[in-house]
């Protein structure tokens, strides 16, 4: 398996999100992260997406179920994965904890980082 994290312009995402993951037919994982002007922010989003995708795979949550929920999400502010109804809510929350540890380890403020993500 190969895991690729690629930074792209925000407008090229499949739907309004800062990070998106896709399991390729050959078993590789492709992650696309919106450009934010700081490699550390982009890496944190990418790592979140990787952890989320791997946990979903382990727990039998399909990419199709995640995509359907995310693309159709109209729950207002915030990430679709924060919604307890999301089929990948637990996996998203675990990935967020890893993301927070990485942001802290990089010496960054979670609040400033989170505001940059929300600004997209």
Image (cartoon, rainbow, N blue to C red):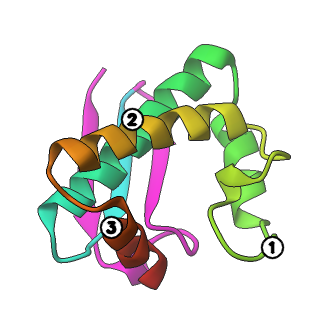
| Nearest-to-viewer mark from 2 and 1 | 2
| SS at mark 2 in the image | helix
Q: How many marks?
A: 3
Upstream in the sequence, badge 2 or badge 1? 1
Which label is found at residue 113? 3
Q: Nearer the viewer, residue 9 or 102?
A: 102
Vertical comparison of 99 with 11: above or below: above
Residue 120 seen from this side: no
* Disc on the earlier residue, 2 or 3: 2
Q: Residue at x 40, y 43 (%)?
A: 48
Q: Which residues are magenta?
A: 1-27
Q: Give neighbour class at mark 1: few <14, some 14-19, many 20+ (Cα, 10 Å).
A: few
Where residue 54 appears, as percent x and y from the top left, is 48, 25
C-beta proximity under 8 Å, tags 2 and 3: no
Cα distance, mark 2 to mark 1? Answer: 26 Å
In the image, what residue occupies the spot 30% across and 78% down?
9
Q: Secondary structure at mark 3?
A: helix
Disc 2 to disc 3, C-alpha distance: 14 Å
Residue 7 in the magenta stretch? The answer is yes
Circle 1 residue: 74
Secondary structure beneath label 1: loop
- Mark 3, other Cα within 10 Å: few <14 / some 14–19 / many ≥20: some
Residue 99 x/y as whole percent: 37, 44
**Residue 28 appears left or right of 76:** left
Q: Position of residue 2 (x, y in %)?
A: 26, 27
Where does the image place residue 12, in percent across and percent down from the top left? 40, 77
Answer left or right for 65 relative to 96. Answer: right
Which residue is under mark 2? 98
């Amino acid at each position: 398996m190969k895991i690729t994290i690629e930074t792209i312009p925000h407008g090229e995402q499949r739907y309004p999100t800062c990070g998106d993951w896709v399991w390729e037919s050959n078993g590789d994982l492709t992650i696309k992260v919106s450009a934010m002007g700081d490699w550390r922010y982009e890496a944190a989003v990418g790592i979140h997406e990787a952890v989320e995708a791997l946990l979903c795979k382990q727990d039998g949550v399909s990419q199709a179920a995640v995509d359907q929920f995310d693309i159709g999400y109209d729950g207002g502010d915030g990430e679709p994965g924060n919604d307890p109804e999301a089929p990948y809510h637990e996996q998203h929350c675990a990935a967020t904890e890893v993301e927070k540890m990485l942001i802290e380890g990089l010496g960054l403020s979670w609040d400033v980082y989170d505001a940059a993500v929300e600004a997209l």
